Image (spheres, helix red, strand yellow):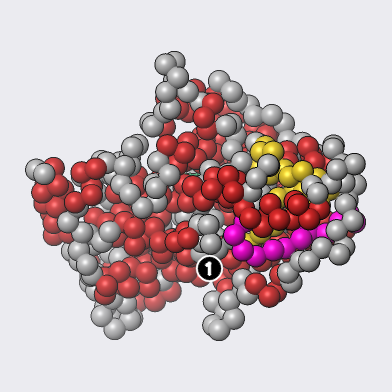
Amino acid sequence: MTTQLVWFRNDLRLADHAALIAAAGRGPVAALFVLDDETPAAWKMGAAQRWWLHHSLASLGASIAARGGRLILRRGRAGPMVRALAAELRAEVHTLVHHEPWAVTQLAEAGAVTPHLGVTLARPNSVLSGTGGRYRIFTPWWKKLLEQMPPPRPLAVPGINWADAGSVASDDLASWGLLPTAPDWSGGFADWQPGEDGAAARLADFARRAARYDAARNLPSVEGTSRLSPHLALGEVSPNTAWHVIADAVGEAVAEPYLRELGWRDFAANIIEQFPDHGDAPNRAAFNDFPFIDDPAGLKAWRDGETGYPIVDAGMRQLWATGWMHNRVRMITASFLVKHQLIDWRHGERWFWDCLVDADYASNAQGWQWVMGSGVDSSPFNRIFAPVGQSAKFTAADYIRRWVPELAKLPDDAIHAPWEAGVGLIRAGVKLGRDYPQPIVGHEAARARALAAWAQVKAG
Ligand SMILES: Cc1cc2nc3c(=O)[nH]c(=O)nc-3n(C[C@H](O)[C@H](O)[C@H](O)COP(=O)(O)OP(=O)(O)OC[C@H]3O[C@@H](n4cnc5c(N)ncnc54)[C@H](O)[C@@H]3O)c2cc1C
């Protein structure tokens, strides 16, 4: 029987993996992962996600070994590598369809490969308007997607007859140097459990909390969201599985706000299929000439969580320490960079790419272009988040205490804007400018400057 090569990409799981199931049904299976830093070029995987990848591959390799198989690891340009190994094993190749522009290139370069669906809830190019066009606005797209929902129920791990791949060359995972060493900044990542088992455990935990999702998802001080994003980004759990586990736990109606967020993930894939350079180029041409400011010191203050705005600094420090940031705070920190600081959104996008364990080309670009106002479906530029107002509205005091401990003693009503705290600062023993920075920009002045920049763009 012909050997079947399963080419794993960012779909590092055995359950609900259509390529693995198809392969197992046709013959003896060999499993491959290629670390490809070449085809994505400037979008090669960032540092935080490389940490995740190491552990996820170790987990997948162990699962395959426990079933009697072996995960072959290779490093280099994926397309030619797959082609060469397929020739060596005289194998037919199966993989899941991914939507990043470099993933499309990899597939095109890999030769005869059978692609399967499993990264999104539906094929992005199957969600079409009445006239057969692609959608660029979320709400009508979501309504149309729902006509195909629920997605198919997840498929179990198949019985697998492994190919004899013992003599095939494979890299040693440790030799890839995916883990940070000097310095090792991953101490704050200890709460994560990369891999398929970790994904299942997190999903099960969230299923117990999912009924409260709609009420709690915007509150960074509580664990209101699933935190499943890094597992989804590396494909350790399929979106179909997430959909059904949560819909079964709380009913589809109660689950709807969560399922809709899964929909945003699919929508982002739909957008990058239409705009492959979404991570680099604004969708709206007017933004090509936006008068951004070159401000390296301001960018550093933002990255380091030293802007003097507690909610912004808490978010940036959470990102650095844990590789993840709450969605509400992603919006606030991103808005602060592009509107209060007038710094090019692509600097922020790149920083997120390097720091996020859930870095996803489509969702990240969509998030940044949404905040900037330059995306096809985005918040208007003149909607400028007031960081202090957002912080108070979404009761972020405890979140700030955790990530900006120098302000921990301030009472709830003072912690969002310490420069206004007056005697509260003295009581808490905090001296602004010494213990914690003064705000690097004033909100009203920054707002006026941003609106003036926008007016300049509109005037052409
Ligand atoms: C500037 C900015 C950058 C972002 N970058 C990324 C990124 O690189 N990777 C990423 O996965 N998400 C990104 N997001 C979207 C969102 O912030 C995260 O998906 C979410 O915070 C993950 O936490 P969770 O798993 O607890 O989400 P939940 O609230 O539990 O949502 C469920 C799932 O839906 C998906 N999802 C939720 N919100 C969005 C969204 N707005 N767009 C696309 N998918 C979504 C995620 O896969 C998530 O796990 C970004 C948002 C912004 C504003």
Asked whether, in this view, residue 281 is left or right of residue 63, the answer is: left
Q: Quadrant of the N terminus?
A: top right
Q: Where in the figure is residue 79, as x and y percent of width and height?
A: 62, 53
Choose between 178 and 232: the one closer to the eye.
178
Q: Is residue 141 above or below residue 38?
A: above
Q: Is residue 284 magenta?
A: no
Residue 414 placed where, x, y %?
A: 31, 64
Depth order, front residue of 395/86: 86
- Location of residue 421 in the rendering, given as x and y in whole percent from the top left corner: 25, 68
Residue under the point 13% across and 56% down: 449
Give the residue displayed 76% in from the left and 66% down from the top. 170
Q: What stretch of residues is rendered in magenta?
A: 67-78
In the rendered image, which quarter is residue 311 located in?
Answer: bottom left
**Which residue position is annotated with label 1?**
47
Q: Which of the image's four quarters has the C terminus? A: top left
Local secondary structure at mark 1? helix
Up-down: is 350 above or below 154? below
Residue at left offset 63%, top offset 55%: 80
In the image, residue 75 lies in the stretch drawn in magenta = yes
